[in-house]
Image (cartoon, rainbow, N blue to C red):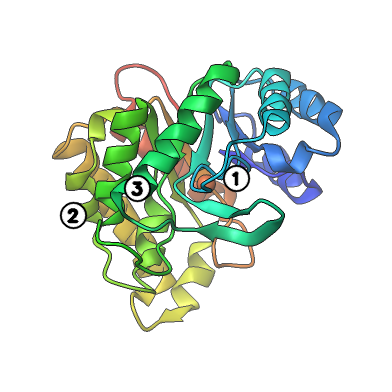
Amino acid sequence: MLVHNSKTYMDYLDKLGDISDVYELLLIQYMNEPDELNKMADRLGKPIIAHTTRFSFGTDAPVERNLLDNMNDLIFRCKAKWCGDHLCFTGVPGLGSGGLLPPIMNEESVDVFVRGILEAKKVINTPLLIENVVQYYQVGTMSQAQFLKDVVEKADIGIVLSMENISTSKSFMESDYYEFIDTIPVERIVQIHCTIGNSQEQKEMKSDIFGTIYDKQMMQYEALEYLVKKRGVKPKAFIWELETETDSHPEVEELRQRMEWANSLFFKNKGAGY
Ligand SMILES: [Fe+2]
């Protein structure tokens, strides 16, 4: 489960209980208070996965050494098994974009990513993964799935597959789970991100594209079954993201049941992930 550094999350975890086998932490929440990261990792007492938006591998400029050292320190502090970032750029030197922007989807841009990731791999002492992003627009001729395939194969790294980001892309352009899944090298999927919201609220939220937000949620679950049953995907971790379009977190019992469902779907014979 992805855990934010907030009282809301700590209160929710108190209610949920210690049932997650692994937690994901957002490094950006600890950049100014790195000691808090040590404390959070100790408090959670389970293996940690690091997640970040800071590398900006899509920026056509050298990755700053200072940044790499800082990230390495944070990853070390929480003893993360690996660290995920995104198939995006978040600005250019001196100017941040304020969001995760999809890159220009062409060969030259693939090379920019690969160069940056290989530089980072020389310094970062834990494996790096790349996550697909919401595709707000299309610039360039390659699909995101093809672009992701080329980047991870050339840089020789694994994938964080975000189910939510594929479906949210539908709000901006054609986006199909099955086409996406069938294009990427599924054997490189190390981790899956899937959202879960408060289903009562989701059912009341109408959507022109999906019917309701609950319908959008159900589509993710169906695509997960396809991943396992048709493509034989075996991730090392499955992470629930509680940040959805709803105001409230899922009811505790609902999350427990969904965790059980994902556990039997992905980790039947070898213990849980989450
Ligand atoms: Fe992410």
Q: Is mark 1 on a helix, strand or loop?
A: loop
Residue type beneath disc 1? Thr
Q: Which residue is drawn at 58% across and 37% down?
A: 62
Q: Which of marks 3 and 2 is nearer the N terminus?
A: 3
Residue annotated with mark 1: 53
Q: Distance between the residues labelled 3 and 1?
A: 22 Å
Residue annotated with mark 2: 179
Using the image as rendered, state which of residue 38 and residue 216 is in the foreground.
Answer: 38
Q: Is mark 2 on a helix, strand or loop?
A: helix
Judge whether residue 164 can be spotted in this image: yes
* Mark 2 vs mark 1: in front: 1
Using the image as rendered, state which of residue 41 and residue 28 is in the foreground.
Answer: 28
Q: Distance between the residues labelled 3 and 2?
A: 24 Å
* Mark 3 vs mark 1: in front: 3
Picture quarter containing residue 225?
top left
Q: Residue at x 80, y 47 (%)?
A: 7
Q: Is mark 3 within 8 Å of ligand 1?
A: no
Q: Is mark 1 within 8 Å of ligand 1?
A: yes
Where in the figure is residue 157, as x and y percent of width and height?
38, 27
Label 3 packing within 10 angstroms: few (<14), some (14-19), many (20+): few
Residue annotated with mark 3: 108
Q: In this view, does 34 lie above or below 215?
A: above
The single residue placed furthest to the left in the displayed view is 230
Picture quarter containing residue 80?
top right
Q: Which of marks 2 and 1 is nearer the N terminus?
A: 1
Locate residue 102 relative to residue 15 in the image: left or right: left
